[in-house]
Image (cartoon, helix red, strand yellow):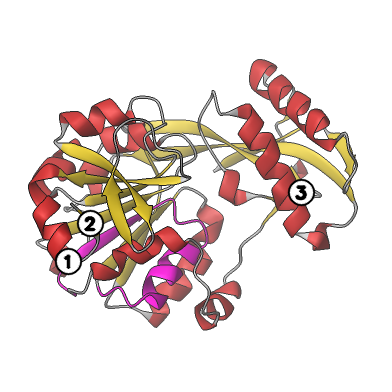
Amino acid sequence: MYSRLTIDYIDLIRGAPGNYDKVLEFCMKFYRTRTPLLTEMSEVKVRFDGRAEFIQGMLDNPSIHDEDYEILKYLKSEDSILLDVGANWGYSAGAFIKLGIKSKIVSFEVISYYDYALGELVKRYPDRYAYFLTGLGETSGSLIFVVPVLNGVANSGLCSANITPYIEGLARNILDYADVNKGLGDNLQLRFLEFTAEIRTLDEIVPSKLPAQWQELPIEAIKIDVEGLECLVLSGASQLLKRHRPLVLAEGANRTEGIQDLMVSLGYVFAEKEGEKLNIVQGIGMKVNGFFLHHGRLAEYQAAGVLRL
């Protein structure tokens, strides 16, 4: 993984009233001009915000990273697979385990630094967890990914290869991250880290690259959180989606460009979580996450207690 760090940066003071405008302007400048970058790997002084030693504490903590994951509790068969696309250091996979989901879990993560953290989950759950350190897309190749860095700490949850991100949302998320992570201090310096990574398609990997004993198991659900590239990743999984018709939990709901048309063409309808169940929704979703359900499996989801019809 080849990395570069922006020469340009901005200084912020925690809580200062002008922070949002400064961050917004800096993000716009970066994505408009891709400001000069240091090219010497030795000059990249960055650490990522997840570590292997976090795994045990995360598993011991009863809280769940995202309450929308609770829908997936219907996955009670050990002879099925849940794909975790955009695994980060493993907190979503940990949430699935804590929710009592019995499916095998296969994670995908582009940041190679998280090999150690995800490896800790394999040590604890060798018969039900596996992972691939690769980016995913519509075709195989490589992409340039960008990560915001505050005081030398990369906010990996905002790692994205989207060249036209929602800048206003990105600026807010950077400041929200700073607010939550008080340990960064009150004087903050913001840069961007850029790295190039391999990408593959889900159709390339699933099922042929899965553990041999898992290759005949059905793919029952996909959770995908890839910061605006959800449509491209799902386009690279068209054969998987046609064959298995899994439930898809997508960050960005159906607002990501192209995703609604793609999923409709594959026989899916859009739904949002209300309380403990899903409701089918017409039009554009307004929540952070949304769900795509294949119309041929709606009665099955209703019988499982996760869908209102």
Figure check: 91 above or below 203? below
Question: Which residue appears farthest toward the top when viewing the image?
Answer: 33
Circle 3 packing at 10 Å, graded few (<14), some (14-19), many (20+), is few
Amino acid found under the numbered disc labelled 1? Ala
Find residue 13 and report its horizontal and vertical position in percent: 91, 45
| Element type at mark 3 | loop
Figure check: 7 above or below 272? above
Q: CA distance from mark 2 to mark 3?
A: 48 Å
Decide if residue 291 is on the left or right side of residue 155. Answer: left
Amino acid found under the numbered disc labelled 3? Lys
Closer to the chain start, of discs 2 and 3, is 3
Q: Which residue is mark 1?
A: 304
Q: Which residue is mark 3?
A: 45
| Residue drawn at (63%, 28%) of the image | 167
Q: CA distance from mark 1 to mark 3?
A: 49 Å
| Element type at mark 1 | loop
| Residue drawn at (57%, 50%) of the image | 157
Q: Which residues are magenta?
A: 78-102
Decide if residue 68 is on the left or right side of residue 302. Answer: right
In the rendered image, the quadrant that contains the N terminus is top right
Q: Which mark is residue 128?
A: none
Closer to the chain start, of discs 1 and 3, is 3
Find residue 51 and report its horizontal and vertical position in percent: 61, 67
Q: CA distance from mark 2 to mark 1?
A: 8 Å
Q: Which is more foreground, mark 2 or mark 3?
A: 2
Circle 2 packing at 10 Å, graded few (<14), some (14-19), many (20+), is many
Q: Which residue is mark 2?
A: 307
| Residue drawn at (11%, 51%) of the image | 297
Is 99 one of the magenta-colored residues?
yes
Amino acid found under the numbered disc labelled 2? Leu
Q: Depth check: 176 or 108 in front?
A: 176
